[in-house]
Image: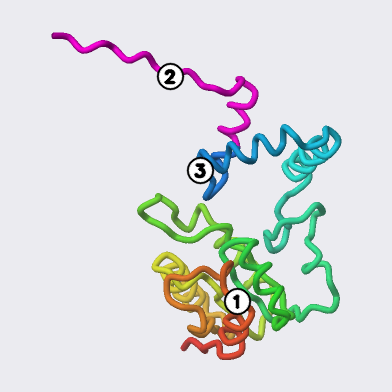
């Protein structure tokens, strides 16, 4: 006896809502149910408020760019940190992403400048040095004198590999600059983005020199 074919269940949402739900699901950590709640929240939100949100998303995509110097995010050629005369221009902190820079800034313990790599080495994902802003980092080191370079990559396998690669290349360039890394106030495998102010304070204040 042949079993009856079960018809495919059609979506209970309109096509517009279904499309909005699918877009919300592309956000990190957002599943189907959360996406549906977001979509129906937008539906009942006043039109002006919803349009303001849409314009804010549009403006971010149209106006945000990477700083010409450090590759932080900005709306101008240089970010506010690179433009500030109050920053210590001889202390350079190297981070993976702008979100890591923001976390360190929120700690209030660092007053130097930054270099954002826009990623980390990951051979399994086919991400080599040429896909990061590592060449630009070495160019800055050749053109400017820094008293200290702080390698603030995340304490992960990829983050450690990125730091080791940079250390090796700096030594090959014979740049006589003190190199340090964040102390392990941040647990191995953790992300700087989610570190508390106390953890970052410990990591920055007890950073370790590298021979």
Q: What residue span does the magenta drawing correspond to?
A: 1-23
Q: Is residue 12 magenta?
A: yes
Q: Looking at the image, tell me whether mark 2 or mark 3 is earlier in sequence order.
A: 2
Q: Residue at x 58, y 23 (%)?
A: 13
Q: Residues within 10 Å of mark 1 (few under 14, many from 20)?
A: some
Give the main secondary structure of the magenta stretch: loop
Residue 208 locus on image (x, y percent): 51, 88
161 relative to 134 in the view: left or right: left
Residue at disc 3, secondary structure: loop
Q: Which residue is mark 2?
A: 9
Closer-to-camera residue (128/51): 51
In the depicted structure, whether residue 70 falls above or below residue 76 = below
In the depicted structure, whether residue 60 falls above or below residue 101 = above
In the depicted structure, whether residue 153 falls above or below residue 59 = below
Q: Residues within 10 Å of mark 2 (few under 14, many from 20)?
A: few
Q: CA distance from mark 2 to mark 3?
A: 20 Å
Q: Residue at x 78, y 69 (%)?
A: 81
In the depicted structure, whether residue 88 falls above or below residue 48 = below
**Quadrant position of the N terminus in the picture:** top left
Q: Which residue is mark 1?
A: 196
Q: CA distance from mark 1 to mark 2?
A: 46 Å
Query: Which disc, if any, is residue 31?
Result: 3
Closer-to-camera residue (23/151): 23
Q: In front of the other: label 1 or label 3?
A: 3
């Amino acid at each position: 006896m042949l079993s009856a074919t079960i018809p495919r269940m059609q979506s209970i949402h309109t096509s517009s809502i279904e499309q909005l739900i699918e877009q919300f699901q592309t956000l990190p950590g957002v599943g189907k149910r959360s996406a549906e709640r977001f979509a129906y929240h937008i539906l009942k939100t006043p039109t002006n408020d919803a349009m303001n949100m849409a314009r804010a998303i549009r403006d971010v995509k149209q106006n945000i760019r990477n700083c010409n110097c450090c590759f932080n995010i900005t709306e101008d050629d240089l970010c506010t940190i690179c433009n500030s005369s109050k920053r210590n221009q001889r202390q350079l902190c190297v981070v993976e992403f702008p979100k890591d820079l923001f976390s360190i800034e929120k700690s209030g313990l660092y007053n130097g400048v930054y270099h954002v790599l826009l990623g980390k080495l990951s051979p399994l994902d086919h991400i080599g040095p040429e896909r990061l802003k590592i060449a630009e980092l070495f160019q800055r080191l050749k053109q400017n004198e820094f008293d200290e370079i702080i390698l603030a990559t995340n304490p992960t396998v990829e983050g450690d590999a990125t730091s080791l690669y940079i250390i090796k290349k700096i030594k090959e360039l014979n740049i006589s600059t003190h190199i340090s890394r964040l102390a392990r106030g941040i647990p191995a495998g953790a992300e700087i983005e989610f570190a508390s102010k106390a953890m970052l304070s410990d990591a920055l204040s007890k950073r370790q020199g590298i021979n």
